[in-house]
Amino acid sequence: MIEKIQALWPEIALFVTACVVMVIGLSPSAAVRRLCGVVTGLGLLAAGALAYTTPAVNPALPGLALYGKAMVAGIGLVLLLLASGTVDREYESFLARGGEGAGGQGRAEYEPLRSTKGEFYAFFLFSLTGLMLTAGATDLVWLFLALELTSLPTYVMVTISSGRDRSMEAGVKYFFLGAMGAATFLYGFAMLYGGTGTTSLGGIANALAAQRAAPGGQINPIAMLGLVLSVVGIGFKIAAVPMHFYTADVYQGASPSVAGFLAFVPKAAGFFALLSLCAAVGWGPTGDTLAEPLRSVLWVMAALTMTVGNALAVVQTSLRRVLAYSSVAHSGYMLVGVIAGPGPAGGGTLMTSGVAAVLFYLLAYGLTNAGSFAVLGCLERVRPDGQAEELDSIEDVRGLCQDRPLLGWALVLSVMSLLGLPPLLGFFAKLPLFGAGLNAGEYALVVVLALNSAVAAFYYLRVAAAAVLEPGQVGRGPVSVRPTTARWRPMAAFVSAAGVVALAIYPVTGWALFGARQGADARSEPAQRAAAEPALPSDPHAASVGATPPAPAE
Amino acid sequence: MLSIPPTLAATDVASYLPVLLLITIVVGFAATNLIASALLGPSRQGDIKAMTYESGMNPVGTARKRFNVRFYLIAMVFLVFDIEIIFLYPWAVTFRNLDPSLSDATVWLGRILFFILTTVVAYIYGYRKGVFRFD
């Protein structure tokens, strides 16, 4: 009983911080209200430090909880920089002006009902708490509650992220489709319970292994149906086809800061859940084949998700929709790693272990993606009538490198990293996916992955070309794009751009060593790779050893 | 050898017979009542009988009008405390039966105090939002 609490200190830290933030966000004093972001950051730092106390809770994937929690705390800090100033900026400046414009006379009274600052940061933290809980899930009930704790706050965050109708529409769409996704995987979990007789992931692994070892060697059809339904339902969280329809509308309707949050947090939660479920099934005695119907479902999902995401991204003119569909495509890439599995038992390295590849990709994608959305969030367009609105079209970033070199190059770096251009982080994240896919013998899927990476170059390069090659707009007629007043947001862009470069430098030097060390000390390799970020993909391979079910009786 | 827990798939279809019987009885009971009252009951219609039932009062105006949002806020605060009480009952029943010499008892107490603390936070939040202010 107490052991469970010991595995949860980071979550408790985040939860307590969320409670504090919720209360101080409603303080009558503007100075105290401004502390919200700082307190949230401190909470995340504390959670990141406490993450190292996490014991291995899930025997099938012992490293997942520690890695997941540390990564969430690290990326959470970048997302916090991005999310700062999303809500209440206008209301606070209205108050600071003493209520000019509305009544005009005297001091404007602070009305707690109109303020959403405390809620926004609290929901931000609640969502990250859920994400950490997902990483440490050992039971289906826990997994479901954690996934919902991750998602429910995001519905509200989308809705309050900007005062416009479009974000409310996005929130409603996201909520209803999210409810459908949750219902689907909850139904799947119920079937899984029906087919195995237990809700504990370890128990399910044992039951499924026993079913495969029995004469006939098949997983119980009810359990298999449950697994497939769960995977399809979790597909909503990771925006995989056929549950991807909401992505573009929601990312476009929410403010860029919340869209950046959505692109990482539910996706990470979905992949933690997928890996936990697949680990319960086991990747077979060779460590690279999932049980058959499940593998086919994931295979089709991966291929369709990549292809549909990229094809739809090519035809968009809105930069936010491009990034939304690119996030769909990236989910498809990561699914290749899930299918590939942890590689040969005991001998998996970053280049052969799909699990390690997915975990590293999540880190890389979270960091890179926060940067591209941060650049969008740093700028706003002034309409002819003087109203400011959020940046949307690719046209808006034309000549950005000339007008605002720092932001422009940050955008170019993050987009190039999303594309997977060699010297950048995205390349070193995508390469292991190819390696793991080849190692698992999924040649067709790897070909699809390669073709899609080539297609993706079209729209990423279009964004980069608009920013780099086009002449600057400043000094040519009326300037329509200007920086927003969110002071911390450019920091998110710069941290992300720096991370994209800095995290990539180690692989460049370490790559030569990599092959040599592959055999002997393979397990510490992913840990070293991620050492620049406080995140260790500690040993997903050892996982497979424990999870490998006995070979079916011939 | 791993033990296989009893599962849905392992059970006999015949074991669902009681469920089938119950469904038949439920549907049959509802259908019989509706049909019987339509066939046997007297049918007298009139303006007064067709009027909206308002606990015996004559209805005033339409029911489709806007309510103050405050009612919803109060409903949500009510839910918070309602749920809290629901969780307190099983906790209290279990806590009585814990061995006081075990360190578990302290942990149990600490947990429920933490849980109550979170509802206190909800209360403070509601108070600051002005949910309890009626002016």
Image: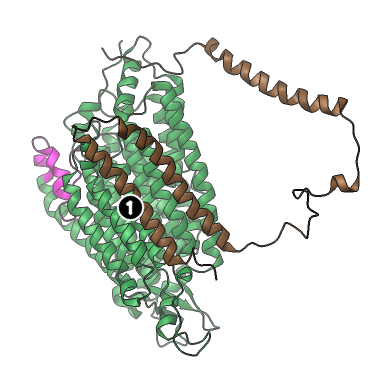
What colour scheme was applied to this rendering of the protein?
Answer: by chain
Kindly identify which chain the residue marked by label 1 belongs to.
B
Residue A32 in the image: state x and y as whole percent: 31, 73
Q: Say if A485 sits above or below A132 in the image.
A: below
Q: Nearer the viewer, residue A19 or A457?
A: A19
**Can the viewer see residue A330 in this picture?**
no
Q: Nearer the viewer, residue A155 or A293?
A: A155
Residue A92 in the image: state x and y as whole percent: 41, 77
Residue A480 in the image: state x and y as whole percent: 46, 81
Packing grade of label 1 (10 A; few <14, some 14-19, many >=20) is few
Q: Which quadrant would the C terminus of chain B be assigned to in this image?
A: bottom right
Q: Nearer the viewer, residue B87 or A157?
A: B87
Q: Which residue is mark 1?
A: B117
Seen at 30% across and 47% down, the residue is B113
**Can the viewer see residue A493 in this picture?**
yes
Residue A237 magenta-highlighted: no
